[in-house]
Amino acid sequence: MKKKMHLLPLLTTLLLLLFSTTNAHNITTILEKHPEFSTFNHYLTTTHLAAEINRRRTITVCVVDNAGMSDLLAKHLSLLSLKNVLSLHVFADYFGAKKLHQISKGSTTTSTLFQATGEAAGTAGYVNITDMKGGKVGFATSDNEGQYGEFTSTFLKSVEELPYNISVIQISHVLSSPEAESPVSGPADLNLTTLMQKQGCKAFTDLLKGSGAEETFAQNVEGGLTVYCPTDGVINSFMPKYKNLTTDGKVSLLLYHGVPVYQSLGMLKSNNGQMNTLATEGANKYEFTVQNDGEDIKLETKVVTATITGTLIDEDPVAVYKIDKVLLPREVFKAAPPAPAPKGSKDAKEKDTSEADAPGPGTDDDSVPADQTASDNGALTINGGWFMPGALSLFLGCLVLM
């Protein structure tokens, strides 16, 4: 009996491991269910804050309804200043309804994404939260004293909570401050294509201009943009495959090389993981994975792995990096086939009699399965979750012991 009791904690842990799921949150999807926040949701996307929110593991988003956003938009702030104001509504900590009413000593101060940008002077990017009498909770930015009243806003209700991942709460009024609303100089004079043309990426910019994708890149400069630019030699070698793509395929491929948020090299190294791109839309994920490899930064697409080889510009809100390969999205190209088995082996014989996959737009190493059911580390997927085969074996072994 004691033996079984000792195994119970281990079995519980294994079960959690086997059937754990990747519950990554998506603020856009959450707010789409609440039309009264449609304006707030729209500007999270326009300012690219949505992508930043979705990458954070622990976060609180304070939303205001459409009427509250009308008051903010009436100030006619630039997009960059509007982004700073909305950044005040995103806390780098989890505050659900219960925690808000149980704040130690009745008051606390939390950091926001505005503080994290480095644009906030002093403590302007912090928000004070106070559990007031009568069950109310008040919010005030650190630099609004004497201009916006004691509390800028109060807690109204919880919209959605996924402890302790993301909490979305509604507050009564927009949080703001003189610092956040102050004019921000944008990259108005930056000509992205001219910059890339002069530094070894002329062939890539020619493709942007010829396909019409250039406009999409230009529209995202002000709000934040990271571009991964294959050098001229890489593009020239790739042209035979590029010409075989459809018009839509060419545009998707080029947009796949842009990420709608600014990311310095330091940010890339500390934030490994999947990245949305300018081509990401609906069911068409068009994502790639950023992964450190020693001092190198790799971009993995399931079809090809590219390496960042140089920096053209790295000044918020724009970063442009040179890469040594064209990024091939799995939605357009097929993944590389497995290496052939040794001659005479059973696997080789089976392969000889199997039907070959139809070739994709590319050739040689650009062919691939239409779907992927196993991750790179060997983990099998179950309804969006995963488990490791080795963990399953250990779990079954424990059952035998019992």
Image (cartoon, rainbow, N blue to C red):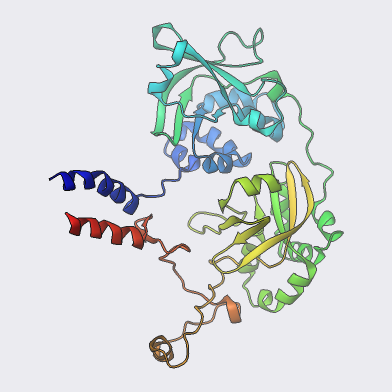
Relative to 150, say whether 279 is above or below.
Answer: below
Q: Is residue 253 left or right of residue 59?
A: right
Q: Position of residue 27 (x, y in %)?
A: 49, 39
The quadrant of the picture occupied by the C terminus is bottom left
Residue 220 visible in the snapshot: no
Q: Position of residue 70 (x, y in %)?
A: 59, 26
Residue 95, image quadrant? top left
Q: Position of residue 321 (x, y in %)?
A: 74, 55
Identify which residue is drawn at 55% across, 33% down: 40
Q: Is residue 152 left or right of residue 183?
A: left
Instruction: Return the residue found at the far front.
Output: 2
In front: 83, or 298?
Answer: 298
Residue 163 visible in the snapshot: yes
Identify which residue is drawn at 25% across, 49% down: 11
Relative to 47, say whether 171 is above or below.
Answer: above
Q: Position of residue 334 (x, y in %)?
A: 53, 73
The quadrant of the picture occupied by the N terminus is top left
Relative to 356, say whether 78 is above or below.
Answer: above
In front: 391, or 279?
Answer: 391
Q: Is residue 164 left or right of residue 64?
A: left
In front: 350, or 195?
Answer: 350
Relative to 332, say whether 63 is above or below.
Answer: above
